[in-house]
Image: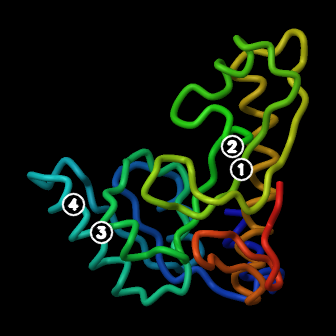
Amino acid sequence: QVIIDQCADGEIPGRVVGVISNEPSVRGLERSAHAGIPGVVIDHRDHKTRNDFEVALGRQIDSYKPDLVILAGFMRILSPAFVDRFVGRLLNIHPSLLPCYPGLDTHQRAITDGAKEHGASVHFVTRDLDAGPVIIRGRVNVLKHDSAQTLAGRVHEVEHQIYPEAVGWFASGRLALQDGIAMMDGKPIIH
């Protein structure tokens, strides 16, 4: 919703051209419909193989002719062929300070490990799960009495700040992936 809103008010110099979900009942489809943005469900369960699903997904993405593909809450591992098709224009947000805690259950893992800080990372998607070049991180302190749910709530707030920022950088031509390196204004992003 934040990205839709920031595109609408000009904070992000672009527009959301379509929303695709593999789950029929997500709020993102309601939000896109409310904003007049085309939305479609491509349910992975309706396809016999992952390849069949990805072919349908890729065709739908291509029909929108996007400059950038933004993953948000998309809990499917994409094949190397699919990632290669959109390399350099495929972003994801992950609820940890990558490279720490790739995969699932990041908040509980951070608490269990006694981490002092946690957060979220926006990264370019590459063939390796949650291992693409990080663009921006947002940090929160892990509090003494945090549960996975309370920590997730604070991380979610940070996600609403950093994801639109990264999208805006890409839309304004400042952000690019070059030779596997995230670049901002022509210089490598170093973390």
What's the distance in space between the residues labelled 4 and 2, CA to CA?
A: 28 Å
Q: Secondary structure at mark 3?
A: helix
Residue type of the residue flagged with mark 2 = Leu
For marks 3 and 1, the one nearer the N-term is 3
Q: Which residue is mark 3?
A: 57
* Image coordinates for residue 131, horizontal then vertical, percent: 56, 50
- State yes or no: discs 3 and 1 in contact (Cβ < 8 Å): no
Q: Which residue is mark 2?
A: 98
* Image coordinates for residue 25, horizontal then vertical, percent: 40, 49
Horizontally, is 89 left or right of 78 in the view? right
Residue type of the residue flagged with mark 3 = Leu
Residue drawn at the location 76% of the way across and 88% of the way down: 172
- State yes or no: discs 3 and 4 in contact (Cβ < 8 Å): yes
114 lies above or below 57: above
Look at discs 3 and 2 and give the one toward the viewer.
2
Residue drawn at the location 52% of the way across and 61% of the way down: 125
Residue drawn at the location 21% of the way across and 70% of the way down: 55
What's the distance in space between the residues labelled 1 and 2, CA to CA?
A: 6 Å
Look at discs 3 and 1 and give the one toward the viewer.
1
For marks 1 and 2, the one nearer the N-term is 2
* Image coordinates for residue 133, horizontal then vertical, percent: 64, 60
Q: Which residue is mark 4?
A: 53
For marks 4 and 2, the one nearer the N-term is 4
Q: Secondary structure at mark 2?
A: loop
Q: Which mark is residue 121?
A: 1
For marks 3 and 2, the one nearer the N-term is 3
Q: Secondary structure at mark 4?
A: helix
What's the distance in space between the residues labelled 4 and 1, CA to CA?
A: 27 Å
